[in-house]
Amino acid sequence: MPESVSEVDHAALLAACARKDRQALRQILELEGPKMLGIAKRMLRRQDLAEDALQDALVLIWRKASQFDPAKGSGRAWIYAVLRNRTLNMLRDGARESATDDDKLERQIDGSELNEAWEMLGHDSELRRCLGRLETEKRSAVLMSYIWGYTHGEIAGRLSAPLGTVKAWVRRGLTSLRECMS
């Protein structure tokens, strides 16, 4: 087994899943499951829903692994995009019913969250290069919104910035990313 997650060839694991190799899916779960569960729990704010999201994401990864295209990004980023999309669908469907706890909003963002989001991107990915060009505030706001699933209000609370400013950072950050990647 590789010494660290960064040494794993996620694209090869996805190719094996496309060939219906159960061991590859098991390895994805062993390597990424705890972090995936943490992300889902952070977005959904409930353990039971996070577990459902993880299970649904793994089923989708198994079924759609053949759709992964290494030319478009890293395997690891694709895996987390599947989880993120499934979790966001659950949120849109009204899965998270409990209100956000004010204490959670007042906590300072843990720098490791943004580092984890950064590491999910392939080291040679175009998205990572374009994100690296953004100002720190814009990059943080985009990552918090699109990777971690925070609302603009939650981001404003975590970054101690006005809501309108956060919305502008996200909008301008996305515009800059779109221009950089085209």
Image (cartoon, grey):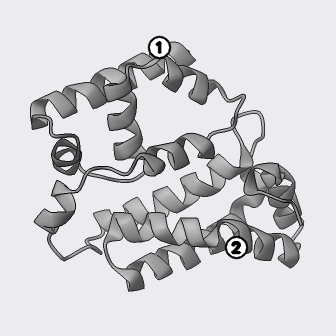
Q: Quadrant location of residue 3?
A: bottom right
Mark 1 surroundings within 10 Å by alpha-carbon count, few (fewer than 14), some (14 through 19), many (20 or more): few
User: 89 above or below 174?
Assistant: below
Three-letter amino acid code at the position of disc 2: Leu
Residue placed most toward the observer, 144 or 18: 144
Helix, strand or loop under label 1: helix
State the residue at coordinates (21%, 25%): 168
In this view of the protein, can residue 147 be seen by the observer? no
Q: In this orientation, which residue lies closer to the viewer: 159 or 69? A: 159
**What percent of the width, then of the height, locates residue 98?**
18, 76
Task: Tell me which corner region of the image, top left, top right, bottom left or bottom right, holds residue 91.
Answer: bottom left
Residue 13 marker: none
Q: Nearer the viewer, residue 63 or 131?
A: 131
Q: Which residue is mark 2?
A: 29
Identify which residue is drawn at 61% across, 46% down. Answer: 120
Image location of residue 109, percent across then percent down: 31, 49
Direction from residue 126 to residue 141 in the image, left or right: left
Q: Quadrant of residue 92?
A: bottom left
- Lateral position of residue 172 relative to residue 106, left or right: right
Q: Where does the image place residue 83, in percent across and percent down from the top left?
A: 53, 62
Q: Name the disc covering residue 179, or none.
A: 1
